[in-house]
Image (tube, helix red, strand yellow):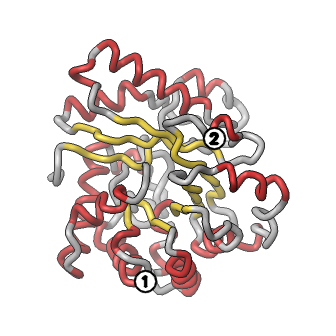
Amino acid sequence: MLSSTKRIDSHVHFYTSKDLRRVAGSLPYTLPEPHPLTAYLDKLLNAAITPAVVNNVHLSILPDSENVFASFEELKNLQAQNPVRYGGIKLVGTIKADPAYATQERLAHPQIVGARIVLHDARPETVSDTRFRDRPWAAFYPRLLAHQHLHIYAKEAETNLRVLRQIPDDVRVIIDHLGSCYSERGPAEPAYIALLTEAGRRGNVWFKGPGYRTSVSPQETARFVMQIVRMVGAEKILLEATDAPHVGTDNNGVPYSDLFDLPKAFNFVDAVAHHVSTQIRIPVDQLLRGASGQLVI
Protein backbone atom coordinates (compact mmCIF):
# COMPACT_ATOMS: atom_id res chain seq x y z
CA MET A 1 0.00 0.00 0.00
CA LEU A 2 1.39 3.39 -0.99
CA SER A 3 1.74 5.77 1.95
CA SER A 4 0.66 8.73 -0.17
CA THR A 5 -0.82 9.38 -3.60
CA LYS A 6 1.69 12.24 -4.08
CA ARG A 7 5.20 10.96 -4.57
CA ILE A 8 8.74 12.15 -5.10
CA ASP A 9 10.84 10.16 -7.54
CA SER A 10 14.40 11.21 -6.81
CA HIS A 11 15.91 8.80 -9.36
CA VAL A 12 14.45 7.83 -12.72
CA HIS A 13 15.75 7.65 -16.31
CA PHE A 14 13.89 8.95 -19.38
CA TYR A 15 15.15 8.14 -22.87
CA THR A 16 13.64 7.43 -26.25
CA SER A 17 14.34 5.11 -29.17
CA LYS A 18 16.20 8.04 -30.75
CA ASP A 19 18.54 8.17 -27.76
CA LEU A 20 19.12 4.41 -27.91
CA ARG A 21 19.96 4.50 -31.62
CA ARG A 22 22.99 6.61 -30.72
CA VAL A 23 24.56 3.66 -28.86
CA ALA A 24 23.13 0.75 -30.85
CA GLY A 25 25.80 -1.87 -31.56
CA SER A 26 28.33 -0.35 -29.18
CA LEU A 27 27.31 -2.17 -25.99
CA PRO A 28 28.07 -5.77 -24.98
CA TYR A 29 24.46 -6.42 -24.00
CA THR A 30 20.94 -5.93 -25.33
CA LEU A 31 19.67 -2.38 -25.20
CA PRO A 32 16.78 -1.67 -22.83
CA GLU A 33 13.38 -0.71 -24.10
CA PRO A 34 12.74 3.04 -24.47
CA HIS A 35 11.41 4.75 -21.35
CA PRO A 36 9.90 8.09 -22.34
CA LEU A 37 8.65 10.66 -19.86
CA THR A 38 5.07 10.77 -21.14
CA ALA A 39 4.53 7.01 -20.76
CA TYR A 40 6.01 7.10 -17.24
CA LEU A 41 3.75 9.96 -16.14
CA ASP A 42 0.66 8.36 -17.63
CA LYS A 43 1.35 5.05 -15.85
CA LEU A 44 1.55 6.85 -12.52
CA LEU A 45 -1.41 9.16 -13.08
CA ASN A 46 -3.59 6.28 -14.33
CA ALA A 47 -2.73 4.46 -11.09
CA ALA A 48 -3.87 7.54 -9.11
CA ILE A 49 -0.27 8.31 -8.11
CA THR A 50 0.68 11.96 -8.55
CA PRO A 51 4.41 12.65 -9.03
CA ALA A 52 5.14 15.96 -7.33
CA VAL A 53 8.89 16.09 -8.08
CA VAL A 54 10.79 13.88 -10.52
CA ASN A 55 14.58 13.78 -11.05
CA ASN A 56 15.71 12.56 -14.48
CA VAL A 57 19.18 11.19 -13.73
CA HIS A 58 21.95 10.72 -16.30
CA LEU A 59 21.77 7.29 -17.93
CA SER A 60 25.20 5.69 -17.96
CA ILE A 61 24.91 4.05 -21.41
CA LEU A 62 24.42 7.41 -23.11
CA PRO A 63 27.45 9.54 -24.03
CA ASP A 64 25.90 12.74 -22.68
CA SER A 65 22.74 13.99 -20.99
CA GLU A 66 20.94 15.59 -23.91
CA ASN A 67 17.99 13.31 -23.11
CA VAL A 68 17.67 15.09 -19.76
CA PHE A 69 17.33 18.48 -21.43
CA ALA A 70 14.90 17.01 -23.97
CA SER A 71 12.67 15.78 -21.15
CA PHE A 72 12.28 19.34 -19.88
CA GLU A 73 10.84 20.35 -23.24
CA GLU A 74 8.64 17.26 -23.33
CA LEU A 75 7.05 18.10 -19.99
CA LYS A 76 6.69 21.77 -20.96
CA ASN A 77 4.73 20.72 -24.04
CA LEU A 78 2.57 18.29 -22.04
CA GLN A 79 1.73 20.99 -19.52
CA ALA A 80 0.80 23.40 -22.29
CA GLN A 81 -1.47 20.80 -23.92
CA ASN A 82 -3.10 19.53 -20.72
CA PRO A 83 -2.38 21.76 -17.70
CA VAL A 84 -4.99 20.02 -15.55
CA ARG A 85 -3.36 16.60 -15.91
CA TYR A 86 0.32 17.57 -15.94
CA GLY A 87 0.43 21.05 -14.47
CA GLY A 88 1.46 20.20 -10.92
CA ILE A 89 4.55 18.17 -11.80
CA LYS A 90 8.07 19.53 -11.24
CA LEU A 91 10.86 17.98 -13.30
CA VAL A 92 14.56 18.40 -12.49
CA GLY A 93 17.63 16.72 -13.90
CA THR A 94 21.07 15.37 -13.03
CA ILE A 95 23.59 15.45 -15.88
CA LYS A 96 26.75 13.52 -16.63
CA ALA A 97 29.61 14.56 -14.34
CA ASP A 98 32.27 14.83 -16.99
CA PRO A 99 34.35 18.02 -16.72
CA ALA A 100 34.25 18.48 -20.49
CA TYR A 101 30.45 18.01 -20.65
CA ALA A 102 29.21 19.56 -17.40
CA THR A 103 30.02 23.09 -18.49
CA GLN A 104 29.01 26.25 -16.67
CA GLU A 105 26.33 26.84 -19.31
CA ARG A 106 24.73 23.41 -18.86
CA LEU A 107 24.89 23.56 -15.07
CA ALA A 108 23.26 27.00 -15.17
CA HIS A 109 20.03 25.56 -16.55
CA PRO A 110 17.41 26.25 -13.86
CA GLN A 111 16.21 22.64 -13.78
CA ILE A 112 19.65 21.04 -13.38
CA VAL A 113 20.23 20.03 -9.75
CA GLY A 114 23.45 18.04 -10.00
CA ALA A 115 25.91 15.91 -11.92
CA ARG A 116 26.48 12.15 -11.72
CA ILE A 117 29.65 10.06 -11.60
CA VAL A 118 28.94 6.47 -12.70
CA LEU A 119 31.44 3.72 -11.86
CA HIS A 120 29.14 0.67 -11.72
CA ASP A 121 31.13 -2.36 -10.50
CA ALA A 122 34.56 -0.68 -10.60
CA ARG A 123 36.90 -2.25 -8.10
CA PRO A 124 38.33 0.13 -5.47
CA GLU A 125 41.89 -0.35 -6.67
CA THR A 126 40.93 1.01 -10.09
CA VAL A 127 40.18 4.42 -8.55
CA SER A 128 43.51 6.12 -8.01
CA ASP A 129 43.97 8.73 -5.28
CA THR A 130 44.22 11.45 -7.91
CA ARG A 131 41.60 10.36 -10.46
CA PHE A 132 39.08 13.02 -9.35
CA ARG A 133 41.67 15.60 -8.31
CA ASP A 134 43.33 16.44 -11.62
CA ARG A 135 43.09 19.83 -13.31
CA PRO A 136 39.84 19.24 -15.26
CA TRP A 137 38.04 18.00 -12.14
CA ALA A 138 39.46 20.83 -10.04
CA ALA A 139 37.95 23.23 -12.59
CA PHE A 140 34.62 21.39 -12.56
CA TYR A 141 33.78 21.49 -8.84
CA PRO A 142 33.47 25.30 -8.58
CA ARG A 143 30.91 25.24 -11.42
CA LEU A 144 28.41 23.46 -9.18
CA LEU A 145 25.96 25.98 -7.78
CA ALA A 146 25.17 26.18 -4.08
CA HIS A 147 21.96 24.13 -4.42
CA GLN A 148 23.51 21.47 -6.69
CA HIS A 149 25.12 18.18 -5.73
CA LEU A 150 27.56 15.62 -7.03
CA HIS A 151 25.88 12.24 -7.42
CA ILE A 152 28.06 9.11 -7.06
CA TYR A 153 27.18 5.59 -8.13
CA ALA A 154 29.43 2.60 -7.47
CA LYS A 155 28.35 -0.83 -6.28
CA GLU A 156 31.31 -1.16 -3.90
CA ALA A 157 31.29 0.79 -0.63
CA GLU A 158 35.05 1.20 -0.82
CA THR A 159 34.85 2.54 -4.37
CA ASN A 160 32.32 5.13 -3.21
CA LEU A 161 34.65 5.98 -0.34
CA ARG A 162 37.68 6.46 -2.60
CA VAL A 163 35.71 8.88 -4.75
CA LEU A 164 34.19 10.73 -1.79
CA ARG A 165 37.60 11.36 -0.23
CA GLN A 166 38.66 13.21 -3.39
CA ILE A 167 35.63 15.52 -3.51
CA PRO A 168 36.15 18.96 -1.94
CA ASP A 169 34.48 19.20 1.46
CA ASP A 170 32.21 22.06 0.40
CA VAL A 171 30.58 20.03 -2.41
CA ARG A 172 27.23 18.47 -1.54
CA VAL A 173 27.16 14.73 -2.36
CA ILE A 174 24.41 12.16 -2.89
CA ILE A 175 25.44 8.50 -2.92
CA ASP A 176 23.30 6.05 -4.88
CA HIS A 177 21.70 2.85 -3.68
CA LEU A 178 22.54 3.41 0.01
CA GLY A 179 26.26 3.15 -0.73
CA SER A 180 26.49 -0.61 -1.30
CA CYS A 181 24.97 -3.14 -3.70
CA TYR A 182 26.34 -6.13 -1.77
CA SER A 183 23.90 -6.95 0.99
CA GLU A 184 25.64 -10.25 1.70
CA ARG A 185 28.54 -8.27 3.19
CA GLY A 186 26.20 -6.68 5.69
CA PRO A 187 26.04 -3.11 6.99
CA ALA A 188 29.01 -3.77 9.32
CA GLU A 189 31.39 -4.29 6.38
CA PRO A 190 34.53 -2.29 7.29
CA ALA A 191 34.49 -0.35 4.01
CA TYR A 192 30.84 0.52 4.55
CA ILE A 193 31.50 1.74 8.08
CA ALA A 194 34.41 3.82 6.74
CA LEU A 195 32.14 5.31 4.06
CA LEU A 196 29.51 6.29 6.63
CA THR A 197 32.17 7.67 8.94
CA GLU A 198 33.51 9.91 6.18
CA ALA A 199 29.98 10.99 5.27
CA GLY A 200 29.32 11.90 8.90
CA ARG A 201 32.55 13.87 9.11
CA ARG A 202 31.64 15.93 6.06
CA GLY A 203 28.05 16.56 7.13
CA ASN A 204 26.87 17.18 3.56
CA VAL A 205 26.45 13.64 2.22
CA TRP A 206 23.06 12.03 1.62
CA PHE A 207 22.22 8.40 0.83
CA LYS A 208 19.49 7.73 -1.70
CA GLY A 209 17.17 4.81 -2.36
CA PRO A 210 15.27 3.02 -3.60
CA GLY A 211 17.55 0.37 -2.08
CA TYR A 212 16.47 -2.67 -4.05
CA ARG A 213 19.91 -2.76 -5.70
CA THR A 214 21.27 -3.22 -2.18
CA SER A 215 18.78 -6.04 -1.58
CA VAL A 216 15.36 -6.92 -2.98
CA SER A 217 14.34 -7.82 0.59
CA PRO A 218 12.91 -4.75 2.39
CA GLN A 219 14.01 -6.18 5.74
CA GLU A 220 17.59 -6.64 4.55
CA THR A 221 17.71 -3.19 2.96
CA ALA A 222 16.36 -1.72 6.21
CA ARG A 223 19.51 -2.92 8.02
CA PHE A 224 21.61 -0.62 5.81
CA VAL A 225 19.20 2.28 6.30
CA MET A 226 19.37 1.84 10.07
CA GLN A 227 23.16 1.88 9.94
CA ILE A 228 23.04 5.17 7.99
CA VAL A 229 20.59 6.63 10.50
CA ARG A 230 22.83 5.66 13.42
CA MET A 231 26.08 6.91 11.90
CA VAL A 232 25.07 9.79 9.61
CA GLY A 233 21.56 10.79 10.69
CA ALA A 234 17.95 10.23 9.65
CA GLU A 235 17.99 13.58 7.85
CA LYS A 236 20.56 12.17 5.43
CA ILE A 237 18.23 9.50 3.98
CA LEU A 238 16.15 9.91 0.82
CA LEU A 239 14.43 6.60 0.11
CA GLU A 240 11.69 7.72 -2.24
CA ALA A 241 12.85 6.76 -5.72
CA THR A 242 11.97 4.15 -8.35
CA ASP A 243 15.15 3.86 -10.44
CA ALA A 244 12.76 3.15 -13.31
CA PRO A 245 12.85 1.46 -15.75
CA HIS A 246 14.42 -1.16 -13.42
CA VAL A 247 17.28 -2.20 -15.72
CA GLY A 248 19.71 -4.97 -14.75
CA THR A 249 19.50 -7.99 -12.47
CA ASP A 250 19.81 -8.73 -8.80
CA ASN A 251 22.73 -10.75 -7.43
CA ASN A 252 20.88 -13.97 -8.30
CA GLY A 253 20.48 -12.95 -11.94
CA VAL A 254 16.76 -12.15 -11.69
CA PRO A 255 15.85 -9.13 -13.86
CA TYR A 256 14.68 -6.20 -11.76
CA SER A 257 11.98 -5.64 -14.38
CA ASP A 258 10.49 -9.02 -13.35
CA LEU A 259 10.34 -7.86 -9.74
CA PHE A 260 9.30 -4.22 -10.01
CA ASP A 261 7.07 -1.82 -11.85
CA LEU A 262 6.37 1.75 -10.76
CA PRO A 263 3.80 1.00 -8.03
CA LYS A 264 5.86 -1.95 -6.75
CA ALA A 265 8.95 0.24 -6.52
CA PHE A 266 7.07 2.73 -4.38
CA ASN A 267 5.65 -0.13 -2.33
CA PHE A 268 9.21 -1.37 -1.78
CA VAL A 269 10.51 1.91 -0.39
CA ASP A 270 7.40 2.21 1.77
CA ALA A 271 8.07 -1.26 3.18
CA VAL A 272 11.70 -0.38 3.93
CA ALA A 273 10.68 2.86 5.63
CA HIS A 274 7.96 1.15 7.70
CA HIS A 275 10.38 -1.55 8.84
CA VAL A 276 12.99 1.02 9.90
CA SER A 277 10.34 3.15 11.58
CA THR A 278 9.15 0.28 13.75
CA GLN A 279 12.71 -0.51 14.78
CA ILE A 280 14.04 2.95 15.62
CA ARG A 281 10.95 5.19 15.76
CA ILE A 282 11.82 7.49 12.88
CA PRO A 283 8.72 8.80 11.04
CA VAL A 284 8.13 7.04 7.73
CA ASP A 285 7.77 10.27 5.76
CA GLN A 286 11.11 11.52 7.10
CA LEU A 287 12.84 8.40 5.79
CA LEU A 288 11.07 8.57 2.44
CA ARG A 289 11.48 12.24 1.64
CA GLY A 290 12.59 14.22 4.69
CA ALA A 291 15.94 15.02 3.09
CA SER A 292 14.14 16.72 0.20
CA GLY A 293 13.80 19.78 2.43
CA GLN A 294 17.59 20.11 2.38
CA LEU A 295 18.10 19.11 -1.26
CA VAL A 296 16.79 20.15 -4.63
CA ILE A 297 16.11 16.77 -6.18
Front of the two marks 1 and 2: 1
Element class at badge 2? loop
Question: Where residue 264 sits in the image (x, y, percent)?
Answer: 27, 49
Q: Is residue 34 above or below residue 286?
A: above
Mark 1 to mark 2 CA distance (whole Å)? 33 Å
- Residue 249 - label: none
Question: Where residue 230 sits in the image (x, y, percent)?
Answer: 37, 83
Q: Earlier in the sequence, mark 1 or mark 2?
A: 2
Along the line of sight, which residue is nearer the eye, 140 or 4?
A: 140
- Residue 231 - label: 1
Question: Where residue 271 sits in the image (x, y, percent)?
Answer: 23, 63
Which residue is most to the front?
A: 146
Rendering quarter of residue 91 = top left
Question: Where residue 181 sits in the image (x, y, percent)?
Answer: 50, 66
Rendering quarter of residue 268 = bottom left
Q: Is residue 294 left or right of residue 16?
A: left
Q: Is residue 284 above or below residue 86?
A: below
- The residue under the point 58% across, 59% down is 152
Q: Is residue 84 above or below residue 151?
A: above
- The residue under the point 29% across, 40% down is 52
Along the line of sight, which residue is nearer the eye, 14 or 245?
A: 14
Give the amino acid type for the residue marked by disc 2 in the picture: Ile
Instruction: Specify few, some or many for label 2: CA neighbours under 10 Å numbering under 14, 14-19, or 20 or more.
Output: some
Instruction: Specify few, some or many for label 1: CA neighbours under 10 Å numbering under 14, 14-19, or 20 or more.
Output: some
Give the amino acid type for the residue marked by disc 1 in the picture: Met
Q: Is residue 226 left or right of residue 114?
A: left
- Residue 61 - label: 2
